[in-house]
Amino acid sequence: EIVLTQSPGTLSLSPGERATLSCRASQRVSSSYLAWYQQKPGQAPRLLIYGASTRAIGIPDRFRGSGSGTDFTLTISRLEPEDFAVYYCHQYGSSPLTFGRGTRLDIK
Amino acid sequence: QITLKESGPAVVKPRQPVTLTCALSGVSISRHGVVVGWIRQSPGKALEWLGDISWNDDKWYSPSLRGRLTIMKDASKNEVVLTMTNMDPVDTATYYCGHKSRVFGVVTPFDPWGPGTQVTVSS
């Protein structure tokens, strides 16, 4: 099983600042099958990034995914008020599929 | 536009089974490449993948829950059904279904997800 470790657990920033979220895999993620989701309270996760770096339809270009192998990063260039949420990474290339434990992005 | 919606009992007694249904619209569960999966999220905790079923009835289950899970599809109703046996309070969670595709070996992640259905295991 591929274990995904996200850091930091909580990130406190202000609107307009840049956020950098990390996801490290215990084994290589095949074909860069790494996705990032955003989840707000009471809602289902929303797909932001797939294939490590491809934005899903309708996702603003301030969201950028990068990385390969075992190290992946989600960068939000200029935080908007609606970006404060929990972010999960997810590998979907190897069974069992796994998720990270999430990074909570709080307003400072 | 693809949408999914989960349904099922809100409360289940310990040691009883639960059956949850995922209704698809905007795509047929029988369409080549379609996969529907189940994911759960315990209160305040991370996401846990349970299993997937494909358009041609291939199934994948989480090893930690294998033996308790059965996923089936009803093409006539365009639904996917999850049955989990021997429910325990630790199985209390929001259960989501999600759509993805698997075509010629290329896989996509879950997108979209249903809104989820809350299941509480309690006597």
Image (tube, rainbow, N blue to C red):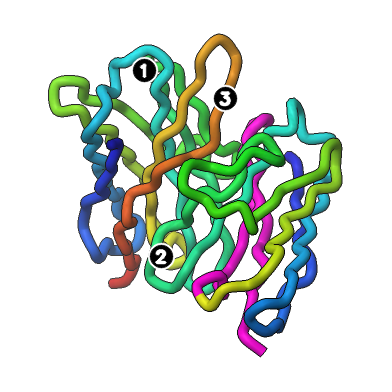
Which segment did they paint magenta?
A82-108
Contact, mark 1 vs mark 2 (Cβ under 8 Å): no
Q: Residue at x 42, y 67 (%)?
A: B89
Chain for disc number 1? B
Front tag of 3 and 1: 3
Q: Inspect the image, locate mark 3, and give the three-letter code of the amino acid beneath it.
A: Val
Contact, mark 3 vs mark 2 (Cβ under 8 Å): no
Q: Residues within 10 Å of mark 2 (few under 14, many from 20)?
A: many
- Residue A51 lies in the magenta stretch: no
- Residue A98 lies in the magenta stretch: yes
Image quadrant where one finds the N terminus of chain B: top left
Q: Residue at x 85, y 42 (%)?
A: A70
Quote the CA–CA distance across marks 1 and 2. Answer: 29 Å
Q: Inspect the image, locate mark 2, and give the three-letter code of the amino acid beneath it.
A: Thr
The tag earlier along the polypeptide, 3 or 2, is 2
Location of mark 1 (residue): B55
Location of mark 3 (residue): B107
